[in-house]
Image: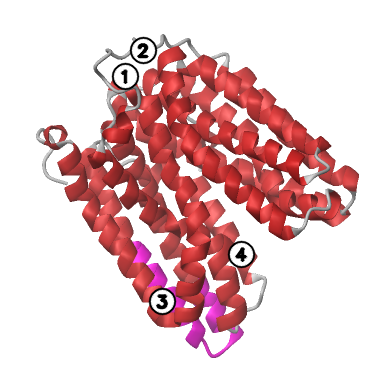
Amino acid sequence: MTLARLTPPAGPPRLLALAQLANSVGDGAYLVCSALYFTRIVGLPPEQVGLGLTVAWGLGSVAGVPLGHLADRRGPRGTAVVLALTTAASVAGLLAARSFAAFLLAVCAYAVGQCGLAAARQALLAALVRPEKRTGLLAYLQSTLNAGLGAGAALGGLALHAGTRTAYLAVLAVDVAGFLVCAAVLSRLPAVPPRPPVAAAEPAFAVLRDRRYALVTALNAILLLRMPLLSLVVPLWVVEHTSAPGWIVAALLLLNTAAVTLCQVRAARAVTGLPSACRAVRRSGVLLLASCAVFALSAYGGSAAVAAGVLLAAAALQVAGEMLQSAGSWQIAFDLAPPDRQGQYQGFFGAGTAAARTLGPALLTPLVLSGGTAGWLVLGALFLAAAHAMGPATRLARPRALATDGRP
C-alpha cells in the first residue's frame, strides 16, 4: 500500500489529519504512562486516580454539547484552537500536580478540553468538507489516530522501561507539545464564519430536546461497548479463562491497531449516505456477535496455541465489525444533524463514547468474566439488536433524507 493511499488529499483534509496525528502521538504516550505516573510519581492512591478520572470524563461528556454550541456560534476554527491550547495547558498542569485536588483540577480540564475539541473539530470538518466526502475523511483521520497512538505508545513504553521521574515527565511534555502543534495546524485552516444566533423562540441547545437523535446516540453508545473489550475485558478473560500465553494480549491490540490504520479507509468507501451507513452498522452487528461467540470458544482451547489462534480469529472479526460500525456511525451522526448546529450535535453524539468508556468496564466485566460463554453470547446479542435497530431509528429521525436513496 502506497503512502498516497494512506494520506488524505492536500488542503483542509490533510491539515486535519496532521492535527490529528500531532495530538494522537502525545495521547498514545500519555495513555500508556498516565496511571503509573499518577500512582508512582505523584503518589496518589489508585482509588483516587480512578475517582478523579471518572469525575473528569463524566464532566467532559456533559461539556461536549455547550462547547460544540460555542463552536457553532463563535466559529469552529477559533474554538478548536483555543480548546487545543486549553488541553495542552491542562497536561502541563499535571506536570506540577502534587495533590489530589491539583490532579483533579488538571484532569477535569483535560477531559473537558478533549471532548470540546472533538466536537469543534467535527463542526470544522463539516464546514470545510462536502457531505459525501466526510466519512471518507473521517476514515483517514481514524487511521491517522491509530498510527499516532501506536507511535506514542512506543514512546510511553520506553518511559515505562526507564521508570524514572524524568522519563514520565518527558512523556507528558510530548503530549503538551502535541496539542500545541495541533493548535498551530488548526489555525492554518480556512476560517469558518460563525452561525447566526438562534431565534428567541428556539432553544439554545436544541439537541437536548431531539429525542430521535438521542435514540440514535444511545444505540451507538451500546455498539461502542466494544471499546473496553480489548483494553480491559479480553486481557482478564485471557488470564482467567483460557490457556493462551499472556503475550497474546499485546498481539490482539497490535492486530487491532494495524488493521484500523491500514484498512479503515477501504472499509469506509462503501458508506456514502444514510442507507449505506445503516447497512454498514447492521453488518457490524453480525460481525460483533460472531466475534463474541469466538471469544467464548477460546475458553475451550486445549492448548496454548489453539487458544491463541481462536483469540486472534475473534479479534479479527471484532476489528472488522469495529471499522464498519465506525464508518456507518460517522455518516449517521453528520447527516442527522442540522447544518447550523453541527457542533452541539457532534458534542452530544460524542458523549456516547464517554459513556461507553465510563460505564463499559462496570457492565462488561461481571457480564463476561462471571457469565462465561452465556455472558459473551448476551453481549453479542446486544450488539446485534442495537445494530439492527439503527436503521429504523435513523428513518424515524430523518425519514425524508432516505427518500432519494432507498431504504437502509
Residue 297, image quadrant: bottom left
How far apart are the two marked residues, 1 and 2, measured between alpha carbons? 6 Å
* Three-letter amino acid code of the residue under disc 4: Ala
- Residue receiving disc 2: 195
Q: Is residue 404 above or below residue 192?
A: below
- Residue receiving disc 3: 375
* Three-letter amino acid code of the residue under disc 1: Asp
User: How crowded is the residue under tag 3: few (<14 C-alpha within 10 Å), some, or many (20+)?
Assistant: many
The stretch in magenta equals 286-311
Find out whether the residues at labels 1 and 2 contact each other: C-beta distance under 8 Å.
yes
How far apart are the two marked residues, 3 and 2, measured between alpha carbons? 47 Å
Decide which of tag 3 and tag 2 comes sooner along the chain. 2
Q: On the picture, is 291 further left or further right than 247?
A: left
Circle 3 sits in a helix, a strand or a loop, which is it?
A: helix
Picture coordinates of residue 128 (x, y %)? 40, 18
Picture coordinates of residue 40 (x, y %)? 83, 55
Residue 305 shows up from this direction: no
Find out whether the residues at labels 1 and 3 contact each other: C-beta distance under 8 Å.
no
How far apart are the two marked residues, 4 and 3, measured between alpha carbons? 24 Å
- Residue receiving disc 1: 340
Q: Is residue 339 above or below residue 391?
A: above
Decide which of tag 4 and tag 3 comes sooner along the chain. 4
* Three-letter amino acid code of the residue under disc 2: Arg
Residue at x 48% of width, y 87% of height? 300
- Residue receiving disc 4: 251
